[in-house]
Image (cartoon, helix red, strand yellow):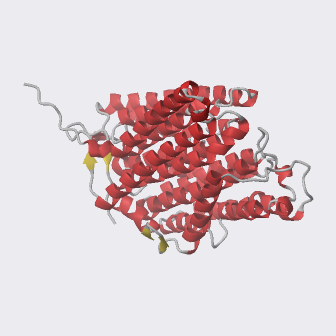
């Protein structure tokens, strides 16, 4: 007699909420549209009301998913979806990263509401695709089996291909979607081939079995792990797999670029953290040389190429490549300090990058992005509030003291020094100095340049204001009090402690 497995649906609770939200958004838009078309003129539902209902529904589901993950983090412990065949787990690391992902998706939804209307492409499937992609990201951070990793990666990427080409009337958007689809397919193929080699060597795909039997002295283990890292590196645009990122970020709608730049990095680095902690080596010694090489290359290429950009979205894309280098310094350092620094850096990057893209979105008008750096010249005279906000995010990206970016970089460099990775810490410090040039160039143009002929949008929507406020407060709050913050209805914000607790259960002190 076959015994049915005892499934623990609590382990996939946040994922189910996100997917249910995506389905609800689609059904709600269809239902409200039919009501609008069949109702009398006096009772007709306007397009604005439909769009608002769809956005609020998506944000509500994402908020509940984020809250559920927070509760799971407070409870602690590890809950497996199928204890007899562990593939998905809800543990402190998965709960914490899911909280970040759901919250960043919530802000992305709020940011997209008026922007899509300005571009004339506001459709409910945008939010459904975004939420399905977020569900794939949440699946990734919970995966403890290579099969689950691949499924989560595909669920994350397939909606992103459609979102990048969501502005179907723009040739640049279509071109970016095709390029991202081809490069993404190549990355998935490389990743899958690496997984096949690991399975051929070990005979199993679970992290537990791989952790016991993986041996880098065997060719299959070495080649499979190398291809796995290459496939994931392509997803986060690590050098030398970075060529696609600037073109895709530039051609995609800005809200999609914002969501991609944050969500994909959080999800993939969560996979890399779990791979390091539970499979390879919690101390980070086995792959330290690889992370050192990738970190150095990403820092040098990202920083040098960002210097010569004239479009702000391309500059943010190349600076994102440099940020990948800083994150890989944490992986090279290893241990509790290094992995904690990686998680806190992801939080800082999320707040800073979403805030910077939110400014670009808030200035768009008449179906055009406010993308050229020259168009920001003299912005302080016409939109002083937006100029001050953009300056704050640029300072945080550069790592200026008083911002969360400084605390994040300090944590990364401190972990590298603690683990005797002095050359990496020095290189990171030097590239941080270089980043001052291209980050502070934006405030210099806004405050010292003559007013540009391209006028920005003069009004800001409530969603854009919410995103800018949340990101701005987070940048300052976690920059001044990184572990002693407090907010109404939430209470104490011990973010550094939370990040440390999410990895400390796996790594011996």
Q: Is residue 115 left or right of residue 287?
A: right
Q: Residue at x 58, y 61 (%)?
A: 470
Residue 350 at least partly seen:
yes
Q: Is residue 316 left or right of residue 350?
A: right
Q: Count the numbered circles shown.
A: 0
x, y percentage for residue 420?
A: 50, 66
Q: Quadrant of the C terminus?
A: bottom left
Q: Is residue 489 above or below residue 352?
A: below
Taking depth in this image into account, of 56 and 331 the one nearest to the observer is: 56
Taking depth in this image into account, of 477 and 198 the one nearest to the observer is: 477
Q: Is residue 501 above or below residue 362?
A: below
x, y percentage for residue 263?
A: 53, 46
Q: Is residue 504 above or below residue 23?
A: below
Q: Residue at x 83, y 54 (%)?
A: 376
Residue at the far left in the pictured view: 1
Q: Quadrant of the N terminus?
A: top left
Using the rendered view, name the quadrant where residue 124 is placed: top right
x, y percentage for residue 272?
A: 45, 47
Residue 254 at least partly seen:
no
Using the rendered view, name the quadrant where residue 70 is placed: bottom left
Q: Residue at x 47, y 75 (%)?
A: 484
Q: Is residue 91 left or right of residue 427?
A: left
Using the rendered view, name the quadrant where residue 313 is placed: top right
Q: Residue at x 50, y 47 (%)?
A: 59
x, y percentage for residue 101?
A: 48, 49
């Amino acid at each position: 007699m076959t015994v049915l497995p005892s499934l623990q649906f609590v382990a996939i609770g946040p994922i189910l909420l996100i997917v249910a939200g995506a389905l609800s958004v689609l059904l709600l838009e269809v239902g409200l549209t039919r009501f609008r078309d069949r109702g009398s003129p006096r009772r007709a539902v306007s397009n604005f009301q439909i769009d608002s209902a769809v956005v609020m529904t998506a944000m509500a589901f994402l908020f509940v998913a984020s809250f559920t993950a927070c509760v799971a983090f407070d409870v602690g412990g590890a809950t497996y979806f199928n204890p007899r065949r562990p593939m998905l787990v809800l543990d402190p690391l998965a709960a914490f990263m899911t909280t970040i992902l759901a919250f960043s998706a919530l802000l992305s939804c709020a940011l997209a509401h008026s922007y899509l209307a300005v571009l004339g492409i506001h459709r409910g499937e945008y939010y459904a695709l975004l939420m399905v992609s977020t569900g794939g990201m949440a699946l990734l951070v919970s995966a403890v089996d290579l099969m689950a990793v691949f499924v989560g990666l595909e669920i994350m990427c397939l909606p992103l291909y459609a979102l990048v080409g969501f502005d179907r009337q723009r040739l640049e958007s279509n071109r970016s979607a095709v390029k991202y689809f081809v490069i993404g397919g190549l990355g998935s193929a490389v990743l899958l081939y690496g997984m096949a080699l690991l399975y051929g060597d070990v005979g199993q795909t679970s992290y537990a079995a791989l952790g016991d039997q993986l041996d880098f002295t065997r060719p299959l283990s070495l080649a499979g792990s190398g291809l796995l890292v290459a496939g994931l590196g392509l997803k986060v645009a690590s050098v030398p797999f970075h060529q696609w990122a600037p073109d895709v970020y530039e051609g995609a709608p800005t809200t999609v670029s914002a969501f991609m730049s944050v969500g994909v990095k959080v999800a993939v680095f969560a996979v890399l953290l779990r791979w390091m902690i539970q499979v390879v080596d919690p101390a980070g010694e086995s792959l330290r040389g690889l992370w050192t090489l990738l970190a150095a290359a990403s820092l040098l290429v990202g920083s040098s190429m960002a210097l010569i950009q004239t479009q702000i979205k391309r500059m943010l894309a190349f600076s994102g490549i440099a940020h990948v280098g800083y994150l890989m310094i944490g992986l090279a350092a290893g241990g509790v300090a290094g992995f904690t620094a990686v998680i806190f850096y992801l939080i800082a990057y999320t707040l800073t990058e979403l805030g910077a893209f939110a400014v670009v979105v808030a200035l768009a008008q008449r179906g055009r992005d406010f993308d050229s750096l020259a168009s920001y010249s003299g912005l302080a005279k016409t939109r002083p509030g937006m100029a001050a906000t953009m300056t704050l995010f640029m300072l945080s990206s550069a790592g200026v003291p008083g911002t969360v970016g400084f605390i994040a970089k300090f944590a990364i460099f401190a972990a590298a020094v603690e683990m005797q990775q002095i050359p990496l810490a020095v290189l990171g410090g030097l590239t941080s100095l270089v980043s001052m040039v291209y980050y502070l160039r934006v405030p210099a143009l806004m405050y010292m340049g003559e007013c540009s002929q391209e006028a920005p949008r003069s009004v800001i929507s409530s969603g854009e204001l919410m995103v800018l406020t949340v990101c701005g407060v987070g940048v300052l709050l976690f920059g001044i009090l990184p572990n002693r913050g407090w907010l109404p209805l939430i209470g104490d914000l011990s973010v550094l402690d939370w990040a440390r607790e999410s990895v400390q259960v796996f790594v011996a002190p």
